[in-house]
Image (cartoon, rainbow, N blue to C red):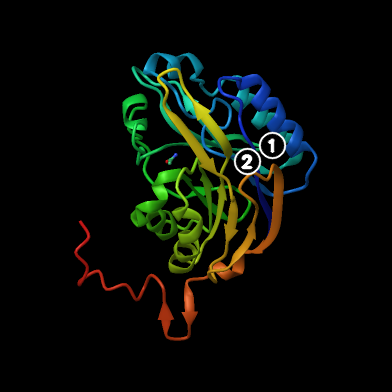
Amino acid sequence: MKLTVGFLQFKPEFGKIRENTDYIIGELKKHRFDIAVLPELCTTGYLFESVKQANEFAESKDGYFIQSLSKLAKEKKCIIAGGFCERGKEKPFNSQVLVSEKGVLSIYRKAHLFYKEKEIFAKGNTPFKAVDTGKGYKVGLMICFDWIFPEAMRSLALDGAQVILHSANLVLPYCQRAMFARSLENRVFIITANRFGKETNSKGESVEFTGKSQITSPEGEVLLTIGEKTKGFYSVEIDLSLTDKQMNPLNHLFNDKRTDLYNLF
Ligand code: ACM
């Protein structure tokens, strides 16, 4: 099965959920695709100064972002994943929604919180399970720093995910250099949608994001990469037959695992 898959890289305006959502919808409307991935926290921006401030921007399924995204997925009969600040009990979650023409397929809550995210967000509680898109293939959801824990992507791949939808707000340069290996070792496609730009909050804290969104293949190739500050939607065609785990007549990526020798848990 062949799919057109892509990402939208841009610079969200901090706290402007409506404006950011309208920009996203406007851009995606211009393109034809089967899967689109948006960055982490793509409607709010990243650098919250307090739990209270993050809670002010937290949304639920009935919020403007998810409603707008679901409507677009219905019109275009596609699937879209993107990061948002999800309303929780005391703290919000750093979450990622997956929508199709059927509505919300899944919400994933970031498991591995990066640095001061630990002060703002509640720890994710959704397992790394593949999501059946209902279109003859499965996807996996993950957010930014999750990438550095290989168990996360392995869990998704073992559960049948063929395309990993990775919404990111990367601040370090390593992920983009490393993802070819995650793709290769799990025989999955990975769409990393990153953002660019700098944010500074009232406490004087500052972060700059590294852009360079990319798509990597099960053969370890970088199929598509863009610049640090390139803005817009970019896509490529992928062939899901490459995610077959039979590497040659004698080697199967999962059946050949020597779990009797590993010391993982
Ligand atoms: C990150 O996980 N946003 C670095």
Residue 73, labelled with which disc? 1
The image shows a total of numbered marks equal to 2
Q: Residues within 10 Å of mark 1 (few under 14, many from 20)?
A: many
Q: Is residue 36 left or right of residue 184?
A: right
Q: In this view, does 213 lie to the left or right of 205?
A: right
Where residue 165 appears, as percent x and y from the top left, is 54, 48
Q: Who's the residue at 44% across and 21% down the image?
A: 87
Quarter of the render that holds ligand 1: top left
Say which quadrant the N terminus sits in: bottom right
| Residue of label 2 | 80
Task: Give how far apart the Cα atoms at labels 2 and 1 are.
Answer: 7 Å
**Observer-nearest of 47 and 237:** 47
Which amino acid type is marked by label 2? Ile
Q: Which amino acid does label 1 sit on?
A: Ala
Residue 264 shown left or right of residue 148 in the figure: left
Residue 20 percent location from the top left of the image: 65, 26
At x 45% / y 60%, what residue is drawn? 178
What SS does tag 1 mark? helix
* CB under 8 Å between discs 2 and 1: yes
> Label 2: how many residues lie within 10 Å, few (<14), some (14-19) or many (20+)?
many
